[in-house]
């Protein structure tokens, strides 16, 4: 089983269907498509957008028993960022996460994460997909160690690496990600969960994502 930790957002799909979005959902969905059992640990607001996220996760086959509700903060919403002048594919426009102030969005506390992971002892891989506090990272490390799970930590571009065990995998998201990074991480996590060693799992993920190694 793969446990993906992060904060899903509400988004409208191009066909108008209400759905879940964000890096944590991209990772979880890619791992699920590979055939893995996936549980998402996160938090949304206690609102209609949060209800839509739950329904969307169910349609994707992603477990959400550990998806918490925040009564005080709204579910984040992904919208197209018309002010962004970075060239991107029209099918994958740049997105803006609202509210822009992170303090106005739900946040995962160390206690939330510790409790959730204690109820998911069968985890083979734990992915910390969104920026969380150092205390929450420590809780994720402890939960992964308790389950004997491999740990993957994702960082925003330019972020310093957090203090994690030497055997953990730390990956930095590209600045101009079009969604392929999350898909690559999901395949990587799925391959690890299927028993591949990290090098073989990473090679499979890179190949499946259409990425090409950069020569030294």
Image (cartoon, rainbow, N blue to C red):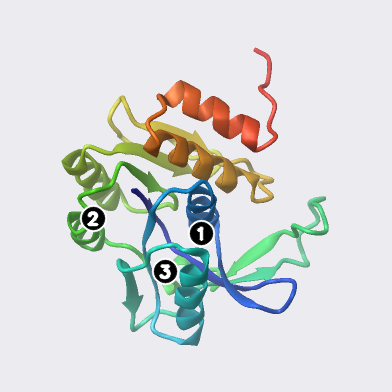
Structural distance between the alpha carbons of marks 1 and 3: 21 Å
Q: Residues within 10 Å of mark 3 (few under 14, many from 20)?
A: few
- Mark 3–mark 2 contact, CB under 8 Å? no
Label 2: which residue?
120
The image position of residue 35, as x and y in percent, is 47, 48
At a point 41% along the width and 27% down the height, the residue shown is 196
User: Dot 2: what SS?
Assistant: loop
Q: Foreground residue, 90 or 206?
A: 206
Q: Residues within 10 Å of mark 1 (few under 14, many from 20)?
A: many
At a point 23% along the width and 57% down the height, the residue shown is 110
Q: Foreground residue, 170 or 58?
A: 58
The image position of residue 1, as x and y in percent, is 33, 48
Label 1: which residue?
25
Q: Foreground residue, 50 or 210?
A: 210
Residue 165 image-quadrant placement: top left
- Mark 1–mark 3 contact, CB under 8 Å? no
Q: Is residue 75 left or right of residue 71?
A: right
Tell which tag, 2 or 1, sits nearer the viewer: 2
Structural distance between the alpha carbons of marks 3 and 2: 28 Å
Q: Earlier in the sequence, mark 1 or mark 3?
A: 1
Q: Earlier in the sequence, mark 2 or mark 1?
A: 1
Q: Which mark is residue 203?
A: none
Q: Residues within 10 Å of mark 2 (few under 14, many from 20)?
A: some
Q: Foreground residue, 126 or 58?
A: 58
The image position of residue 114, as x and y in percent, is 20, 56
Residue closest to the far top: 216
Tell which tag, 1 or 3, sits nearer the viewer: 1
Label 3: which residue?
103
Structural distance between the alpha carbons of marks 2 and 1: 18 Å
User: Dot 1: what SS?
Assistant: helix
- Mark 2–mark 1 contact, CB under 8 Å? no
Query: Which quadrant, please, contains the C terminus?
Result: top right
């Amino acid at each position: 089983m793969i446990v993906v930790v992060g904060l899903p957002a509400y988004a409208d799909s191009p066909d108008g269907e209400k759905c879940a979005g964000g890096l944590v959902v991209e990772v979880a969905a890619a791992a699920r498509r590979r055939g893995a059992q996936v549980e998402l640990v996160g938090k949304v607001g206690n609102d209609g957008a949060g209800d839509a996220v739950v329904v969307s996760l169910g349609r994707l086959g992603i477990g959400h028993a550990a998806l918490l509700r925040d009564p005080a903060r709204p579910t984040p919403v992904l919208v197209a960022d018309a002010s962004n002048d970075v060239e991107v594919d029209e099918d994958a426009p740049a997105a803006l996460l609202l509210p822009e102030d992170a303090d106005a969005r739900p946040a995962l506390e160390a206690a939330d994460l510790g409790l959730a992971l204690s109820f998911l002892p069968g985890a083979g891989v734990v992915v910390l997909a969104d920026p969380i506090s150092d205390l929450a990272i420590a809780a994720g490390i402890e939960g992964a160690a308790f389950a004997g799970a491999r740990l993957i930590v994702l960082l925003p571009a330019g972020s310093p690496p957090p203090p994690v065990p030497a055997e953990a995998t730390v990956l930095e998201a590209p600045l101009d990600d079009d969604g392929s990074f999350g898909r690559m991480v999901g395949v990587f996590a799925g391959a690890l969960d299927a028993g591949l060693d990290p090098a073989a799992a990473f090679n499979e993920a890179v190949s499946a994502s259409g990425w090409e190694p950069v020569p030294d």
